[in-house]
Image: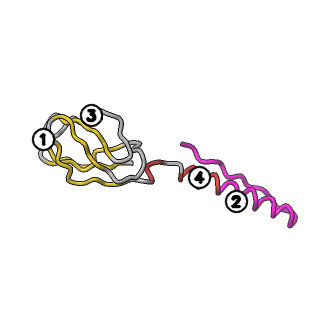
């Protein structure tokens, strides 16, 4: 992701100052919109999720379709986690090869 470049300009009159200010406002807006477009801003930590061997349905409270997930912490064993079905607005579907407890970051 790249952020817009901010341009500098010498101002010689009030109308030129207004034009520069308006351009600056547009550049700030583009910068903020680029940050707000990141789905990772809406993240939830799911802690102490007990997984069994095989398929696991993990509820999340995002309120929208899950875009991604990341493993934050593992207790007991090192699992191989694989998504076995597309996530929806309420559930993340993962398979695990071991019984373990994990914490996940979802967005």
Identify the residue at image location x=53%, y=49%.
Answer: 37
Asked if the residue under mark 2 is in contact with the one under mark 3, i.e. CB atoms within 8 Å, the reply is: no
Q: Is residue 37 left or right of residue 17?
A: left
C-alpha separation, residue under disc 3 versus residue under disc 1: 14 Å
The location of residue 2, given as percent across then percent down, is: 57, 44
Residue at 59% over, 47% down: 3
83 horizontally vs 100: left or right: right
In the picture, the quarter occupied by the N terminus is top right
Within 10 Å of the Cα at label 2, are there few (<14), some (14-19), or many (20+) other Cα atoms? few
The image quadrant of residue 99 is top left
Residue under numbered circle 4: 33
Which is more N-terminal, label 2 or label 3? 2
- Residue matched to label 2: 25
Marks 4/3 in contact by CB < 8 Å: the verdict is no
> Seen in the image, is 59 located left or right of residue 74?
right
Point out the frontmost of discs 4 and 1. Answer: 1
Question: SS of the residue at dot 4?
Answer: helix
- Give me the C-alpha separation between circle 4 and circle 1: 42 Å
Select label 4 or label 3 by which is in front. 3
Report how far apart the C-alphas of labels 4 and 3 lie in the structure: 32 Å
**Does label 4 or label 3 sit earlier along the sequence?**
4
Find the distance from the CA under tag 1 to the CA under tag 2.
53 Å
Q: Nearer the viewer, mark 4 or mark 2?
A: 4
Q: Nearer the viewer, residue 17 or 37?
A: 37
Mark 3 lies on a secondary structure that is strand
Label 3: how many Cα within 10 Å (few below 14, some 14–19, many 20+): few
Per the image, the residue denoted by label 3 is 82
- Label 1 sits on residue: 99
Q: Which residues are magenta?
A: 1-28
Mark pair 4, 2: CA separation: 12 Å
Which comes before the other along the chain, label 1 or label 2?
Answer: 2
């Amino acid at each position: 992701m790249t952020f817009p470049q901010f341009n500098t300009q010498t101002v010689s009159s009030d109308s030129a100052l207004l034009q520069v200010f308006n351009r600056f406002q547009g550049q700030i807006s583009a910068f903020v919109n680029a940050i707000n477009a990141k789905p990772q801003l809406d993240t939830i930590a799911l802690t102490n999720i007990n997984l069994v061997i095989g398929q696991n349905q993990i509820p999340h409270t995002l309120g929208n379709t899950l875009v991604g997930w990341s493993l934050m912490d593992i207790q007991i064993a090192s699992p191989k986690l694989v998504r076995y079905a597309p996530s929806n607005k309420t559930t993340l579907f993962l398979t695990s090869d071991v019984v373990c407890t994990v914490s996940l970051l979802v967005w």
